[in-house]
Image (cartoon, helix red, strand yellow):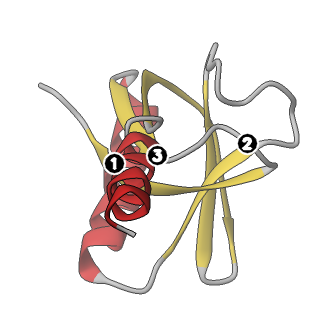
Amino acid sequence: MKKSSILLFLLILSAKSFAVTNVGLVDRIYPSGESVKFRLKEDSCNGSLNEYYEFTLDSEVKKAWFSILLSAAATGAEVAVRVEVCEGNRKPIDYLYQNF
């Protein structure tokens, strides 16, 4: 039992290490209903035109993310986005930020 608990803990810990942070210029912003989908230029996480990062506008922080995206797109600044995995057409993000 103890060995299986340790193995489970290590498996969970290693799963978190697969998270990916990508940095790039905003390629497309696609607001839809209560969510925002977006792509970065030359992003290894989005291989096709149908793949997007996505978040819902259900908090003030996420509304600030949307503002960051709009500002970065208008000024040509890079943003960083973190996701747990780079799989699927819609990737829910953990967070988004912009360095100055």
Q: Are marks 1 and 3 in contact (CB under 8 Å)?
A: yes
- First in sequence: mark 3 vs mark 2: 3
Q: CA distance from mark 3 to mark 2?
A: 14 Å
**In this picture, residue 13 sits left or right of residue 33:** left
Observer-nearest of 13 and 38: 13
- Quarter of the image holding residue 54? bottom right
Q: On the image, numbered disc 1 is attached to which residue? A: 13
Amino acid tagged 1: Leu
Q: Position of residue 94 (x, y in %)?
A: 39, 56
Q: On the image, numbered disc 3 is attached to which residue? A: 15
Q: On the image, numbered disc 2 is attached to which residue? A: 87
Identify the residue at image location x=87%, y=42%. Answer: 50
Observer-nearest of 28 and 54: 54
Amino acid tagged 3: Ala
The quadrant the C terminus occupies is top left
Q: Position of residue 58 (x, y in %)?
A: 42, 86
- First in sequence: mark 2 vs mark 1: 1
Q: Which one is in front in this view, the residue at disc 3 or the one at disc 2?
A: 3
Identify the residue at image location x=64%, y=13%. Answer: 42
Amino acid tagged 2: Glu
Identify the residue at image location x=65%, y=28%. Answer: 45
Q: Is residue 45 above or below residue 56?
A: above
Q: Position of residue 83 (x, y in %)?
A: 48, 45
In the structure shown, which secondary structural element does the residue marked by tag 1 occupy? helix
The quadrant the N terminus occupies is bottom left
The single residue placed furthest to the left in the displayed view is 100
